[in-house]
Each structure stands twice: as structure tokens, then as C-alpha cells.
Image (spheres, rainbow, N blue to C red):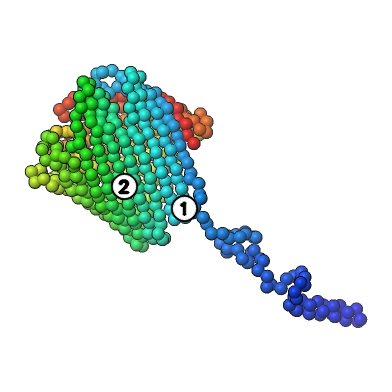
Amino acid sequence: MRTRRTGIAVSAMALTLLSVPAGAGEFVPLGDGSATNNADLLGNPAIDCSNCTATPPYETDTPFDIDWSLGLRGGMRDDGTGNGPTYQLIALPSVTLKQQTIRGGYDVGLSGELTYEVEGSARIGSISGTAGGEYKLDALTTLTGRGNFKASQDDPGGPDYASNVAAAPVVLSGDGEIGASRDLGAFNLAVRGSAGREVYGETVYDDNSTSDNTFQNTTAYGVGARLGYELIPGLVAFIDTEADYLAYDVASPSLLVKLDNVTYAGRAGLNARFNETLELEGSLGLGYTDLIDETLDDFSAVLYGARAVFKPDETLTLTGALTTTISQPGTTSGATAKLTYAASGQVEYLVNPWLKLRADAQWSQAHYQGIDSEEQSWGFGAGADYLLNERTDLTADYSFLRTEKTPAPATDEHQVTVGVKFHR
């Protein structure tokens, strides 16, 4: 009986001590709960860990993701003009910097094509740069922007140039586009605006004479909008409208008037994407080009558009596209514009982790407005990439292109290239 009373007394004394607040400097093993030193209570409830200190995410000082490559190729090209094949060395450098942030992402890219013909001539085929990104204002609104620059020079032996052309003109072009999209529930609205400039240099002939190409210099402005409505999950119906203004620096040397024009276009179509395997889009519309000079005839055209991407598994990708474009006529005498319908298809097959096969086919038909002249071309190609190691690929390609432009005879172009590609 005495032992039981002693145990009860000790327990009561312990409870009394625990119920009294700790004084200054006193050590209380169990704590009184007043100290803010429990990391589990202070942590962010979204962070599933103990003793973590939640810090706000940083968007600055994040390094860019750098991707680069350098292709070195040698090849043979026969343009079908009867002058025999030419042998070329080609360098294809490329670098891209990307950064992802909480609200979007940004990227900057630079690429080029440098060609040296064994007979001694060198040419910068193209140097192009791009910069763009997107920024989410909120969960429903996204802003986008992109700028592009390109300096290019065609091969003077191509079908678009006379046999006495020694150097094709250098073409400088730049354009920019900004856009905004808003999720409106079942509807989605996107608007865009663009501006661009294209400048042509002189054409040089075999006798060192030159011809001026300023009549091809243009400035372009455009606006557009696209409204989509989700019929069912994965299936969207849309309408797209745009207006583009094209201004020429000087008058056409053949028509003696400027070819300034405004093109209005409207399309309606469907976009279907139910999973990662298949994506389809098709549209049909009408375009109308209003030539500002009253002595020139306006024209209209039916606009076809389609795109398909099929990925049945990780090894096979098939893509196809059908496009309609209205562009300037170039050096074609008497024409006011060029209307082009084009179709293309590509297939890529990963045989194994070391070998990738690819093939493509293309077709296009161009109608020159204002004159009775047409241009048609079709071609195909095949290639392979073999992975030597993590940074090096061997490449091989063959391409064929047949071009028919009235009243000139048809030309058949063959090109074979082999080389190596170093990449990150």
C-alpha cells in the first residue's frame, strides 16, 4: 500500500512540473511548444520533406541549355544543264541557346552553310539567326515573339539563273512577329502582327558586268487572328483571317509600275489530336490580292492547307503537308505575283540505337499571275545517319529534283553528299 502511494505521488509531481511554464535558462526536455524551431511545421506544405527550408524559385542566373553541331560534307552535284558535275565541300555550323523559366522560355539560334567548289569558287550559302520566346501573363494568357534574320546567296548554276551568271545576288532578309493568345474556355483566341524587309544585291555575269535587282526589294506588314472552338476533347474547329501589305522600293522594269499589293486571306478547318500518336489538321480558304496600281488586274485563289504527323512508336515518324503561298514573282518578266501549291512528305525510321534512315518527297506547282507561265517541280531524297559515338555521326544523302518551267526545257538535278557531323 505504501509503494502504490509513493508511485502516485511521483507521477503527480512530474505532471505538475511539466504543466509549469519553463523559466529563463531552464532546460525542458519535451519543450513547451512556444519555440519556432520545428522545420516540419515551418516548411512549405507543398514540399514533402523534413527539415527543409522553403525558398522562392529563382528565374535569374539560370544557365542556358546549349546545343551545337558542325557538319562537314563532301559531295557531287549535277544541275542538269549539260555542264557536267561539280564537286563541293560544305560546312554546316549551328548553335542554339535555350532557357526555360517558370512563365515560359526563350531561345537564340545561329546557323550557316558555307560551300567551296573544288574548281576554286567559294560561296556563303546562308547565315541565319533567330531569337524568340513566350511569356505567360497568367494561367490563361500567353505572349509570344520571334525575330529572324538571314543572309543567303543561291548557286548560280541553278535552274533559276541564266548560263552566263557568275554570281547570284546576295539576299538580306529580316522579319519579326509578336502574338498573344487567350484561353476562353471552349474557345481560344490568338492574334498576331508581323513586319519584314528583304533586300537584293547585284547579279554578276561572266564578263564582270552586273544587273540591278532593287525592283525586288520589299517591305511587308501583316496582321492576323485565329479563333478555335473545342468540339470534343482533342478536336478543334478554327477560322483564321489575315491581311498582308507588300510594298516595293521601285517599279517593275517590265511593267513600269510598282507591284504594291494587299492580300486578304480567310481559312476554316479542323485540328485533331487525341494522343501522341497522330495529329491531323486541314483547312480550306480563299485569298484575294488587291494590286494598288489600277492598271494591274487583281486576282483570287483557293487556299488549301493540310498537315499530318504519325508516330506509331518511338522508332517511326511520318509527316506530310500541303501548303498554298502567294509571293512576289522574282525576275519573271511581266508577272505580278506567284501562286504556289506544294506538297511534301518525310519518313524517319530508327533501325537501332546506332542507325537512322530517312526519306522525303516533294511536289510543287507555281502559277505566275499576269502572264501565261507555269513552273512545276518534283523530287525525292534518301539518307542515313550512323552514330559513331556520343558526339559523332556519319551521314550520307542523295537527292533528285526535276524542274519544268515554260517555255524552258526541263532540268534534272542530282546531288550526293557524305560526311561527318559533330554535335553536343
128 horizontally vs 302: left or right: right
354 horizontally vs 79: left or right: right
Q: Residue at x 28, y 18 (%)?
A: 84
For residue 21, above or below residue 346:
below
Q: Which residue lies furthest to the right in this view?
A: 2
Q: Residue at x 37, y 59 (%)?
A: 141
Instruction: Judge by depth and name the residue closer to the eye, 212 or 263.
Output: 212
Three-letter amino acid code of the residue under disc 1: Thr
Residue 398 appears in the picture as rendered: no
Q: Residue 253: name its quadrant.
A: top left
Q: Is mark 1 on a helix, strand or loop?
A: strand
Q: Mark 2 points at which residue?
A: 176
Q: Name the residue under label 1.
A: 101
Residue 207 horizontal/vertical position (percent)? 21, 20
377 horizontally vs 185: left or right: left
400 horizontally vs 72: left or right: left
Residue 67 horizontal/vertical position (percent)? 46, 39
Q: Residue at x 38, y 27 (%)?
A: 90
